[in-house]
Each structure stands twice: as C-alpha cells, then as structure tokens.
Image (cartoon, rainbow, N blue to C red):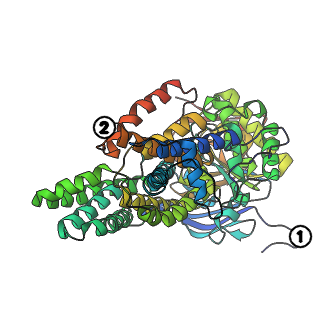
Amino acid sequence: MSLTTEGVAAPSGHRPARLTARWLVAGVVTAVVAALAGLAIGPVPINPLGGAAELLNLIPGVDIHSGLTPQETAIVTRLRLPRVALGLLVGAMLALAGGCYQGVFRNPLADPYLLGVAAGAGLGATVAVTADAVFSPTVLPLFAFLGALLAVALTYALGAAGGGRVRTPTTLILAGVAVAAFLTAIQTYLQQRDVDAIREVYSWLLGRLAPSGWHEAQLLLPYAIVAGGVMLAHRRQLDVLSLGDDEAASLGVQPRRVRYLVVVAASLGTAAAVAVSGLIGFVGIIVPHTVRLLAGTTYRVILPLSALFGGAFLTLADLAARTVLSPSEIPLGVVTAFLGAPFFILVLRTATRVGL
Amino acid sequence: MSVAGDPGPAVDLAGVGVALGGTAVLGGVDLTVRRGEWVTVIGPNGAGKTTLLRAVGGLLPFDGSIALFGSGVGTLRRRDLARLVATVPQTPTVPPGMAVFDYVLLGRTPYIRPLGRESRADLAAVDEVLGRLDLRRFADRPLETLSGGERQRAFLARALAQGAGVLLLDEPTSALDIGHQQEVLDLVDELRADRGLTVLASMHDLSLAGEYAERLVLLVGGRVVASGPPREVLTEPLLSEHYGARVRVIDAEHGPIVVPVR
C-alpha cells in the first residue's frame, strides 16, 4: 500500500487526485526541520547538525563525530529528543484523528474530542487526582485514557435514534454532546469539592509535553502505530463516505462499519495522546483544514499530510512554549491556540482553492 | 418458471412491502422489468416511488422478494450488489472541491479492494465514460462549478462507471430545463441501446415519462394500480381518479401527452 499513485494515469492522461511526491516531501522536510529546531533551540543552544549527528549515533553501529560536548549530547538525547519525539507523535495523532472525524461525520467543525473524549479524559484525570494524591502521577494517564474510551463507548451506546437501531453521524454527535455535558458536570463537582485538585488537573487540562525520559513516547508509540495505520488505511473510504450514507452504500461500502472502525481507531489514538499530554486543542481542527486548503480536498491527500504537518506544528508550538518565557513554560494548549488562529486566517486569505 | 433459453428478467419484485417508521409505505408490489427494458414509475406525491427505487437498490429492508438477474437483493453483499445496480438519486451529494474525474472514479468503488487503490482498468473505464458523455473537458474542474445539465451528466457518468446492468433513476429531470430534460433522457435511451442497460426510473412529468418509457407503472398509496404501455396507463379516467386533477390526454408521435386543464 503506497502513499502515492505516481505513474498511473488514464489513457487520456488524466490523473486521479493523489498525494504528490512534492507535497509528501514538503511534509517530511517540515517535520524534520521542526525536529531539528526542537533539538537545537533551548537554554543551551546546540548546533543542529551536531544534534542530527547524535541522533544518527543512536543507531547501533553508527559513530559520527558530532562535535558536541558530553553535556550537550546528554541534553540532546535525554532531554530534548524524547520531547521532540513525543511532540511529533502527539501532533500527528491529534491531526490525523481530527481529519478522520471530519471525514466520518462530514462536519468541518469536528475535532478529535467530539464524542466526549475530552470530557471523559478530564473526568478520569480529576478522579485520579482527587482519589489518591500519592499515586496520582502514575495513575493519571491510565485514568485519563480509560475515561476517554469509556466516554466514546457511552456515546456509541446512547447514540442511536429510532428505538435504539439507527446510528447516524448526527445522532452520534448529539449523544456526544450529552455525554460530554454529563461527564463535565461530574468533573466540576469533584473539582469544587477539592480545591487543590483543581490546580493540578488544570495544568493537565491545558496540555503539556513534559516527558520523563522515553516513558511517555514508549507508552504512546504502539497506539500511534496501530491507530494511525487503521486511519490511514481507510482514507479512500472516507472519500466515498463524503457522498452520504445512502450513496456510499449504493457504491458497495458499508458506511456504519467504516464509521465505527475509523472512530474506534481515532478515539484510541486520541485517548493515548491525551493520556500522556493532556488536552491540547486546536491541532485537530486547524491542521486538517489547512492541508485541505493548500493541498487538496480528498482524504487520500489530507490524512497523510495532516499527520506530518500536525507533528511538525506541535513540535514548533512546544518549542515556543518552552523558550518564549524561559525558564517558565507556557501551557501548550495556550500556545497552539495563540499560534494557530492567526496562521489559519492567513492561510484562509491566501488560499486560492476553497472548499470546506 | 422460465422458458429454456430465456435469460430471465433483470428486475423482479414479488409481493414487496416496505414499512418506514411503523407505517406501510409499499404493499404487495409485483413488478417485472425485462432485460434492456425501460420502465418508469409514476404516481402522486407520497405514493412510494422513491421508496420503491431505494428498495430495489438494496437501501431498505423489505418484505417479499426482489431479484436482480436472478439473485435476491437481500442475499447479496454490498459490493456485489453495487456491480449489478447503480442508482442516481434525486439530489446527489456534491462533495465540495472534488474534480469531475475523481467524482466519476468513485463509481469504480465496487471494483477497488476496500483498502486498495484504483487500477489502470478503472481509470480507463472512467475515461471511456467521460468521453461517451462529453465530459472530458470538465475532467479537472470541481463538480460544483458545472451547470445543472452538465452536473446531471456527471451524476449519470458515475452511475455508468459502476458497470452495472440495471440503472435506477430517481426524478432524473426535476432540476433541469426542458432542453436539458430531453438531452438527458435521449442520452439514457442511447446508452440503454448501446450498453444493453435496463432502466427503472421514477418521474413526475407524465408526458416525458410516456415518451421515453416502454412501460409505465402507476403507483398510488404504495400499491400498483396500473401497469402497461403508456397509452394504456396515461388515460383521462385513470389520471383524474388517482391524481385528482383535470387533464386532457393528446395522442402524439412518441406517446400520449398529458396536459393539465383548468
């Protein structure tokens, strides 16, 4: 399964919409540049080429002289690299899930937190923090993860109209709104009962990349691979789904099954990302839309590029978060909104292609 | 029971009933469409014409039996069904920003593996259909920039790209001016002849229905009330009884013309 269909054209010479090598390279280059910037910039400036060399040295058998001091090498490999890796993974997951939700619900305002994921994760985090202060740091990610998944399951269970049989995009969204409201109510109640808990959960809610070594990236990676794989594999089916359930069915697709698979994968990926990084907003809506405006409206193009540019965007946002007010850090969710909104307006104004 | 050598009807409905939300919308419908025939379903609003087409297209549960080329609609997998019957709905969705070529390519979905991609043969099939319907010059343009008549041809192109033997058309002319109405229907008739398509359509315009169909089926309140050649179904007594309208029926070269009179 390749990402491009270069070389396959109709006899008349027309080519189907596809992810061109040009855009794929642009995405990869952007992600690489963002990663190198994340490695190089910080309280101790480090030569990016040296940083890249140390990256390669991690591969067994490779030994390049990077010109960095042992101290600088430690900063790159133990502090910055795990953070950059986490940023790439989380950004890719949120943007990919956002694009998928937009496709599955045919709604340009859909984001990965749509079906109660954010409320469920927030409630899980709050329960972890209020239940036991000693164990909460280690338990919080797990509770957030479970909370997010339970919320989606609840939405799916409740999201059927007509006596419990018909699940349409609209009924699911409405059920998601109801579930989110309910879980948020419980979360608010627990928070106001324990004021100290609010402070701890609040910083988590705003989102941050604060990995302790490779632990978080290792937790996230298997979910990212599986969920990301399933989402990317379904990108053509999302194009068929854009015709509506009836027409998609008459073309041989099973719309409810595709929607279910994609929602499960997207929710899993989002829940895992949220568990390690909190509720980082904006990435899931902005990145797919920007890709749509710049590179094309079919999901064959939008999904892979959203993953690449999403990772790059979050890494750069995190860079800003930790350097602008150094030594203190701005919460990542604040930075993504601050950077994202004007950037998106700029894209909107200069794009020649319209079509949301 | 079929005679030896007779390949059997393209579409065969027996005792078909459909209930939506607890209400019976179709009841006891028997209808047969021979291979290569053009049958148009007419009837007042709410008679169940769209429901009938949706049932034949496998989009609704139904009582009774519906067979396409001998295979029961309820027993076929979605992909196999999509290779037998193609539907052009009344108001097809126009995905924003999608080029005409890619839109018509969606018609090849039943032939592309679920997680795979289109083959050279699929692209060639799209090419051929675009050429046949004179859409090549619009291939790279977004679908929404086409005029009504051109868009209708694109919807038809996607259905044809499915390579199905049965074509279901739900109100194919309701959004078009009289010139484009005739153009689309003439086109469907030519395609029927050169591809051996079987056409089952629903139409509001009685004269057009009579001029282009070989047989008409009058559906009222979910039941078949009359069926036969246009001259037998488009009669003043039948139409005034079931439509509650005053009409004059005039005999013309290609079929009866129905004129409402005050």
Q: Nearer the viewer, residue A178 or A150?
A: A150
Q: In the rendering, at what x and y percent does residue B238 appear?
A: 59, 47
- Alpha-carbon distance for marks 2 and 1? 85 Å
Q: Which chain is mark 2 on?
A: A
**Which residue is at the front of the view, A44 or B165?**
A44
Q: Nearer the viewer, residue B92 or A283?
A: A283
- For disc 1, the neighbor class at 10 Å (few under 14, some 14 to 19, many from 20) is few
Q: Is A208 placed left or right of A3 in the picture?
A: left
The N terminus of chain B lies in which quarter of the figure?
bottom right
Q: Mark 2 belongs to which amino acid?
A: Leu
Name the residue beneath numbered marker 2: A325
The amino acid type, in three-letter code, at marker 1 is Gly
Describe residue B169's horizontal placement relative to residue A290 as left or right: right
Q: Check disc 1 and report the residue beneath it.
A: B5
Residue ID at (55%, 55%): B51
Q: Position of residue A201 (x, y in %)?
A: 23, 56
Residue A347 x %, y %: 50, 29
Q: Are marks 2 and 1 in contact (CB under 8 Å)?
A: no
Q: Residue at x 18, y 69 (%)?
A: A131
Quarter where residue A337 is shown: top left
Considering the numbered disc 1 on the image, is that residue within a helix, a strand or a loop?
A: loop
